[in-house]
Amino acid sequence: MKLHLFSSGSILAWKHLLVRGAPEGIRITVPVPFYLIEHNGEFVLFDTGQQVPDKEFPADAPFIPQVSPEDRAVVQLKKYGIEPGMIKYIVLSHHHSDHSQGLPDFPGVPCIVRKEELKYPYMRALKEQESDREWIHPEELFDLFGDDVADCIPTPGHTLGHQSLRLVTDDCRIVLLTADAAYTDAALEQFPPEKEKDLPYWRTIGMFRKFRNDGAQIITGHDPDSWKELQKQYN
């Protein structure tokens, strides 16, 4: 199993919206990852990135996409030698636009998304728009290649049906792609206030922490500090 990391541009965001407890008024630029998993000649895409905005965002907007036509997932993958028809599955971690906007660029590829995400109007509209596509809604784990090297796992909290990806490398290391279930590495060092300890978000963070304590590598969703080193490691 090989993992390849890409980013469909970036997002300018207020730091306190991504890092709990951060002071307000600080802007940060974060990557918008999508991932290509390669195994035994087959390819799976985890998230599809963002598209070029069709409108301007005010300077004080919470999140401002920064993406060019060349940043689109389909364009980057073609440069890498991967055509849309070569993809076995697309896995959407959740419905938010920076993870799902690129889906129409991969027509006919089966899409795996948790059924709980269909409670959100955006996801329902996307599925209706892409009605010719095969949609798969797993209940629990979903084994992408049939040999337990890449499993979709439910990680609710950020959204109701959020899912992450657990990978096993060729040298038997565990890698966990959290997507937005943990925005940054700092999330793994935080603990809930007493009144929030039973919320799904914190239970998921606790699961990630256990994976890490057991030796897994955790790749969080939008961490600008670790991103460059991760790209060197996997690309």
Image (spheres, helix red, strand yellow):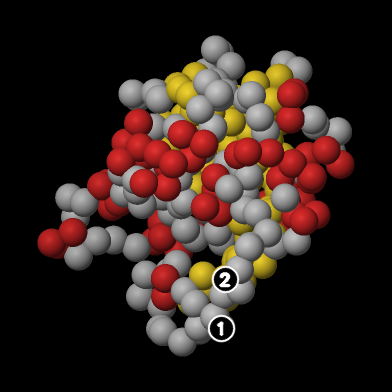
Q: Residue at x 47, y 58 (%)?
A: 183
Kind of residue at badge 1: Ala
Judge whether 160 appears above or below 180 on screen: above
Q: Is 1 situated left or right of 60 in this image? A: right
User: Disc 1 marks which residue?
Assistant: 59
Q: Quadrant of residue 163?
A: top left
Secondary element at image label 2: strand
| Label 1 environment density (alpha carbons within 10 Å; few <14, some 14–19, many ≥20) | few
Q: Is 141 situated left or right of 52 in this image? A: left
Q: Residue at x 48, y 24 (%)?
A: 135
Residue 54 visible, this orientation: yes
Secondary element at image label 1: loop
User: Disc 2 marks which residue?
Assistant: 64
Q: Is 164 situated left or right of 156 in this image? A: right
**Residue that lies at the very extreme toward the top in this rendered image:** 146
Kind of residue at badge 2: Ile
